[in-house]
Amino acid sequence: SLKMPNHTSVNEFLLLGITDIRELEPFLFAVFLIIYILILIGNGAILVIVISDSRLHSPMYFFLGNLSCLDICYSTVTLPKMLDNFLSTHKTISFVGCIIQLHFFHFLGSTEAILLGVMAFDRFMAICNPLRYTILMNHEVCLCLAAATWITGFFHALLHSIMTSRLTFCGSNHIHHFFCDIKPLLDLACGNTELNQWMLETVTGTIAMSPFFFILLSYFYIISFLLFKSRSCSMLQKALPTCASHFIVVILFYAPVVFIYIRPTSDSSMDQDRIAAIMYSVVTPVLNPLIYTLRNKDVKGALSKVIRKKLSVT
């Protein structure tokens, strides 16, 4: 368990949330509650389908199940606390609670970034090596890739949570955000935060951007292969929907991540950071299931089968 350093005089933080206008809070509570319910239903449905339908027991859907599980957990790190704060006058979070929230937010966020890279690798193998795909991407390989993704995310976040918990907080305890993130906490810390800033820009930058460049490279190879090597229209028609779904998810996730973590801290405005954080911790998890179900015949078919089964039971 995390012990608070003796020299820390701040033992709780005040989360200022996304608005200063009290009258807006009940409306925002309703909006974000509906979004959270939709995240749980949409991603929960994909998880159930991927597990229960034997036709979806392939690497692509195994990773999609991982993505849905991540999205449920990711939104659960920030949304319940945010909803609670909309209704309460006492918007505090303990020091340890703050570090735990920061840890899980970065654990699940970096895991999702790496997972999107793994999903691009899976598409590359399926399209460019179709004959060897089932041998190369067997069940053990998929499990190892998923485990490595989650473990890397966990240790990356652990590095940040340990480093942030060692900082001294002796001034204001007002966090200009709706959850505990590293950048707002560094603004409140007394003393030297250069190492923390460096880690955020270098380590987190690398963890976030390496999969992104790998995804771009994978798609470059996939497009080159489809256009110049295979020259097969049926293959192109088959490949495009799954690649398009994945690429839309990548853009939705990466646009705000690049916006927040790659820019120098001095340039950033807290309002812009809060909007970007809402994008990838609230908007992306609610849109991912829609993107994958609306554009994917197999998922749509499995979903309608589950619904028909439920209706025939009732």
Image (tube, grey):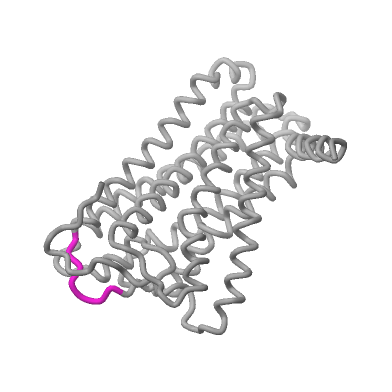
The residue at the far right in this view is 312
Q: Position of residue 287 (x, y in %)?
A: 64, 54
The residue shown at (36%, 56%) is: 102
Q: Position of residue 169 (x, y in %)?
A: 20, 68
Q: Position of residue 42 (x, y in %)?
A: 66, 48
Q: Quadrant of residue 59?
A: top right
Q: Is residue 306 above or below residue 212?
A: above
State which region is magenta: 167-173
Which residue is nearer to you in this view: 11 or 299? 11
Would residue 310 appear left or right of 286 to someone viewing this image?
Answer: right
Which residue is nearer to you in this view: 245 or 153? 153
The residue shown at (18%, 72%) is: 170
The residue shown at (16%, 65%) is: 8
Would residue 209 appear left or right of 25 to someone viewing this image?
Answer: left
Q: Position of residue 181 (x, y in %)?
A: 36, 61
**Quadrant (top left/top right/bottom left/bottom right) for the C terminus:** top right
The residue at the far left in this view is 7
Is residue 23 on the magenta stretch? no
